[in-house]
Amino acid sequence: HERTFLMVKPDGVQRGIAGDVVSRLEERGLKLVGAKFMQISQDLAEQHYAEHEDKPFFEGLTDFITSGPVLAMVWEGQDAVAQGRRMMGATDPLDAAPGTIRGDYGLDLGRNVIHGSDTEEGSAEREIDLFFDDDELVDYERVDESWLYE
Ligand code: GTP
Ligand code: MG
């Protein structure tokens, strides 16, 4: 199965939404294979958001993502990257459907609670490698797997 990198951003942690984000992903059937509660360094922030380095919002984005602890996670499952993106909702919470994480908890584009790997080839692998060593990811079977998949 596929893996994706999902992260509760500092606003989500400070607002006490981290647990709900974990619950939603668990209940969907995705399997948690790695998690780290951490403070992102300036250097890691710039690497993580390198694709946006020429954008006018880059400095604000890296300042924000380093402004408090985050919950960085790796989740595994069928179509994990796309499922993660659907469950997050649109980047701007104004466009995010109710029922999505951003659509239920966000108001502001720059404070949208969660990050998730995009569906571009290689994005998830790049982000997982950036945040986790191989020995920090756990291989195991969830007891409900035979009920989740055909
Ligand atoms: P991430 O999961 O955080 O990567 O969000 P995304 O993939 O839905 O959006 P994208 O990668 O395009 O942008 C990264 C983050 O930058 C977004 O989550 C927003 O918080 C922020 N952002 C994107 N576009 C804008 C913008 O036009 N203005 C501002 N201020 N922030 C933006
Ligand atoms: Mg993105």
Image (cartoon, rainbow, N blue to C red):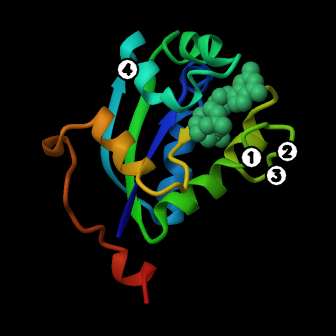
Q: Is residue 8 above or below residue 55?
A: below
Q: Which is more N-terminal, label 2 or label 1?
A: 1
Residue 63: in sight, yes or no?
yes
- Residue 97's label in the rendered image is 3
| Disc 1/disc 2 C-alpha distance (Å) | 6 Å
The label nearer to you, 1 versus 3, is 1
For this view, does 90 lie left or right of residue 53? right
Whether disc 1's CB lies below 8 Å from ligand 1 is answered: yes
Q: CA distance from mark 1 to mark 3?
A: 7 Å
Q: State whether residue 97 is above or below residue 68.
A: below
Secondary element under disc 1, as helix, strand or loop, is loop
Q: Does 29 sit left or right of 108 as displayed?
A: left
Where disc 4 sits, the SS reads helix
Question: Which residue lies under the disc numbered 1?
Answer: 90
**Neighbour class for label 2 at 10 Å: few (<14), some, many (≥20)?**
few
Instruction: Mark 4: give few (<14), some (14-19) or many (20+) Cα within 10 Å.
Output: some
* Disc 1 + disc 3, Cβ < 8 Å: yes
Residue 95: numbered disc: 2
Specify the quadrant that holds the C terminus: bottom left
